[in-house]
């Protein structure tokens, strides 16, 4: 169990760790990174879809956070502040270039809604590729909102704080993003529900 400044790390609130970093504590920011890296990595990977791009964006984000501690106002949670920096780093990359994901996002829980029932790993891999490719076709802002709300499980209010937009904007972006995804992923739902090709084979005719 690690410690910062003589206290058990788990007992030190995030805001106190950030304050200690601002005061020159050489270990405080590293503790913050260790505490929240996995979730920040998940956000970056789902937003960009490419591990190399996600790793670079996360590195940029943590470096920005390290340097920007003086601009942290303390009004939001440190995790909200960090997520905002990570999302902005990812959106910057999406806007600068067209990123074609090379690997699936690998979120089985998220993919369950469209994955074939009793699917084998190969089928899940194919579904993940389809979902990743579909997300890539969304505008960056819609993609970020959907990833936070639908994939990471954030409430609309929390997502709005991360993205620094009104809650109504998050709802609108999610609704528009889902509408764009529906025709792109409809074949996956048909496969899960036993319609389309699968049902045609059972019934002996085309649908």
Image (tube, rainbow, N blue to C red):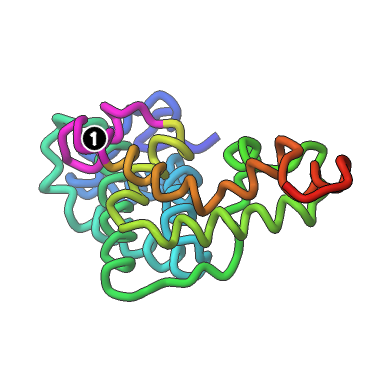
Q: Residues within 10 Å of mark 1 (few under 14, many from 20)?
A: many
Quadrant for the N terminus, please: top right
Look at 28% across and 37% down and name the residue there: 80
Task: Please state which of residues 59 and 131 is positioned toward the viewer in this rendering.
Answer: 131
Task: Please state which of residues 194 and 65 is positioned toward the viewer in this rendering.
Answer: 194
Q: Where is residue 37 in the image (x, y as percent from the top left)?
A: 45, 47
Is 164 in the magenta?
Answer: yes
- Determine the secondary structure under disc 1: helix
Look at 33% across and 66% down and name the residue there: 94
- Residue 16 visible to the viewer: no
Horizontal relation, residue 180 to residue 108: left or right: left
Look at 86% across and 41% down and name the residue there: 203
Of all residues, the one furthest to the top in this rendering is 11
Number of marks in the rendered image: 1
- Residue 47 visible to the viewer: yes
Task: Please state which of residues 200 and 26 is positioned toward the viewer in this rendering.
Answer: 200
Q: Position of residue 137 (x, y in %)?
A: 41, 61
Which residue in the structure is indicated by mark 1? Answer: 160
Q: Is the magenta stretch mostly helix, strand or loop?
A: helix
Horizontal relation, residue 193 to residue 31: left or right: right
Of all residues, the one furthest to the bottom in this rendering is 97
Above or below, 169 against 71 in this view is: above
Horizontal relation, residue 139 to residue 22: left or right: right
Horizontal relation, residue 84 to residue 57: left or right: left
Q: Determine which quarter of the picture holds residue 168.
A: top left
Q: Where is residue 55 in the image (x, y as percent from the top left)?
A: 46, 64
Look at 25% across and 46% down and name the residue there: 21
Is 72 in the magenta?
Answer: no
The magenta segment: 154-172
């Amino acid at each position: 169990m690690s410690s910062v400044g003589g206290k058990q790390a788990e007992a030190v609130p995030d805001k106190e760790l950030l304050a200690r970093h601002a005061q020159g504590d050489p270990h405080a920011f590293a503790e913050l990174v260790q505490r929240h890296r996995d979730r920040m990595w998940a956000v970056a990977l789902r937003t960009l879809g490419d591990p190399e791009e996600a790793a670079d964006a996360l590195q940029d984000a943590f470096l920005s956070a390290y340097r920007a501690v003086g601009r942290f106002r303390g009004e939001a949670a440190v995790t909200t502040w960090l997520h905002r920096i990570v999302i902005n780093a990812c959106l910057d990359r999406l806007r600068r270039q067209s990123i074609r994901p090379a690997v699936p996002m690998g979120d089985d829980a998220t993919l369950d809604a469209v994955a074939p029932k009793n699917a084998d790993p190969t089928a899940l891999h194919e579904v993940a590729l389809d979902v990743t490719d579909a997300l890539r076709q969304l505008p960056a802002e819609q993609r970020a909102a959907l990833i936070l709300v639908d994939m990471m499980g954030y409430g609309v209010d929390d997502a709005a704080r991360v993205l620094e937009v009104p809650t109504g904007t998050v709802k609108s972006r999610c609704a528009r993003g889902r509408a764009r995804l529906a025709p792109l992923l409809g074949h996956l739902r048909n496969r899960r529900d036993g319609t389309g090709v699968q049902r045609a084979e059972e019934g002996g005719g085309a649908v």
